Image (cartoon, rainbow, N blue to C red):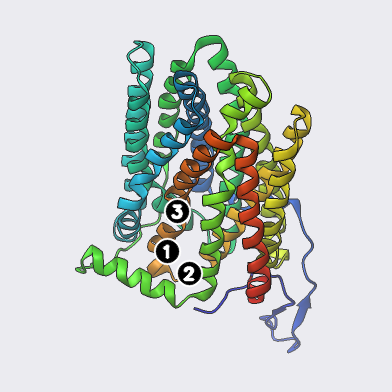
Amino acid sequence: MDNISHEPEIITIAPSSNGESNNFKSLQKPKISIRQTFAALKYSNYRLWFWGQMISLVGSWMQTTAQAFFIFELTHSPAFLGYVGFATGIPAWLFSLYGGVVADRISRRKILVYTQIGMMFLAFILAALTFTNLIQPWHIILLAFGSGIANSFDAPARHAFVNELVDKEDLVNGIALNSTMFNTATAIGPAIAGIVYAIFGPAWCFSINGISFLAVLYNLYKMKLKPVVKKKNDNSVLKEIREGFGYLKSQKNIMAILLITTMLSAFGMGLVTLFPAWAVKIFHGDATTNGFLQSARGVGAVLFALIIATINRYIVRGKYLAISTIALPILLFAFSFNRSFVLSLALLVLLGGVIITLYNLANGLIQTIVDEKFRGRVLSFYTFTFFALYPLGALWIGTLAEYFGSPIAVMINAIILLIFGIAIWILNPSLRQIN
C-alpha cells in the first residue's frame, strides 16, 4: 500500500456552485494550531474512551509501581523484578498473534470489556492476598502471568479501536492523545502509589486499581458506535496469521518500524524495571523515591506526546523516528553515570519524552499506512514487540544488575542501542523519508 502523507500541502478548492468563476482558489499551508493538539476530543466516543482509560490507567500504574517495590521488599533481589516482567510477557509469545486475529474478526469493544473485567478481578485477588498477609513472591509472578494473558487480547483491540472512535483525518492525533493519556497516568499514578504505599501499604494500591476499571467499563457501555460489518471468515486462525505475515513481508517500511520498536522494548525500557533497586541502592530511598522516578519519566512522556499531537501533521515523522533512535542511548549513558537525584529526575523527563516519541511515531506511521483488512493483525505484531520483548529485556537487565550492578547494566543496554541506532541511520536512509 502506498504511503499516505499527512504533511499539509497547498489545497485547491473547486469552482463555486454559482458558476461565476472557473478559477481555482488555493489556500496557504496551514499554521500549527493548539486546536490540533486536542482534535480527537471533539468526538464524543473518543472523549468517553479518553477519560475512562485515564482513570483506569492511573490505577494500573499505581499497581505496577507498588507491585515492583513490594516484590523487591519481599525478595531484596533485582533479578526478581525481571522475573515478574518476564512472567507478564510469556503470554504474549503464546497469544498475541491470535489476539490480533480476534481483533479483526469480532467486536473490539466486546474484547475490551472482557479483558478489562479479567484484569479487574486479578487486581482484587492480589489485594486480598496482600491484606491477609498470605502473599508470596510466586503469587505475584502467577498473577502477572494472568495479566499478560489479558493484555495479549486487550492490546491489539485497544490500538485498533481508535480507528472506530475518530475520523481518518484525526486518527494520528487520536493515537498521540492516547499516548498523552497513558503517560499522564504514568506521571500521576506512580507518585500517588508511592504516597499510598508509604502510608497505607501496597494492598490499597492494588484495591484502587481494581476499582478504577469500573470507569472504563462504564464508558465503553455508554459509547454509541457505528456498526462495523465484519466479513464472514471461514479461514483457520493459523491461515489468518500466515496471511498477516505475508502482508507484513511486503511492507518494508512497517518492517523497519517494527525493528525499531523491537530494540526499544528489548533494550530501551529495561531501566524502568530497575527503578525500585535504583531508588534503594543508588539513592538510598524508599517507595516514595521509586514513585518519583516513575513519575518523572511520565511527565516527560506527557510533554512530548502533547508536542507530537500538535505537530504530527507538519513534520517528516520517519526522520524524527530515526533521530530519536540515536538520542535514546545517549540519554541512557548520561543517566547511568549520574548520581544526583535532581539531575536524574531531569534526565528521566527527557528519557520518557524520547521513549514516547519513538512509540508514538512508530504507532502513528503503522496505523497510517496499514491496510484496514490487516489492521488488527499488524497491530498485534506491534504490541508483540512490547509485551513479548520488554519482559525478555527485563529479565536480561535484571540479571545483569544482579551480577554487575544497575549502572553497568544500563550502560550495556545503551551501547547496544547506540550501535543499532547508528546502523539504522546509515543502512536505511529511506526510513527518514517516511511520512
Q: In the rendering, at what x and y percent does residue 249 appear?
A: 43, 75
Q: Secondary structure at mark 3?
A: helix
Q: Secondary structure at mark 1?
A: helix
Q: Residues within 10 Å of mark 2 (few under 14, many from 20)?
A: many
| Label 1, label 3: how far apart the Cα atoms are | 9 Å
Q: What is the number of the mark on residue 396?
A: none
Which of the two residues, 163 or 159, is positioned nearer the viewer here?
Answer: 159
Three-letter amino acid code of the residue under disc 1:
Val
Q: Can you tell which quarter of the image residue 234 is in?
A: bottom left
Q: In the rendering, at what x and y percent does residue 408 appear?
A: 64, 40
Q: What is the number of the mark on residue 383?
A: 3
Three-letter amino acid code of the residue under disc 3:
Thr
As displayed, is residue 368 above or below residue 58?
below
Q: Which residue is mark 1?
A: 378
Q: Check if mark 2's residue and mark 3's residue have beta carbons within 8 Å.
A: no
Q: Is residue 38 among what the camera can see? A: no
Q: Which residue is mark 2?
A: 370
- State which tag comes first along the sequence, 1 or 2: 2
Q: Tell me which residue sits at (53%, 31%) in the image.
A: 58
Q: Tell me which residue sits at (48%, 21%) in the image.
A: 70
Q: Can you tell which quarter of the image residue 313 is in?
A: bottom right
Q: Nearer the viewer, mark 2 or mark 3?
A: 3
Q: Quadrant of the C terminus?
A: bottom right
| Label 1, label 2: how far apart the Cα atoms are | 8 Å
Q: Check if mark 1's residue and mark 2's residue have beta carbons within 8 Å.
A: yes
As displayed, is residue 253 above or below residue 295?
below
> Could you tell whether 356 is left or right of 230 in the image?
right
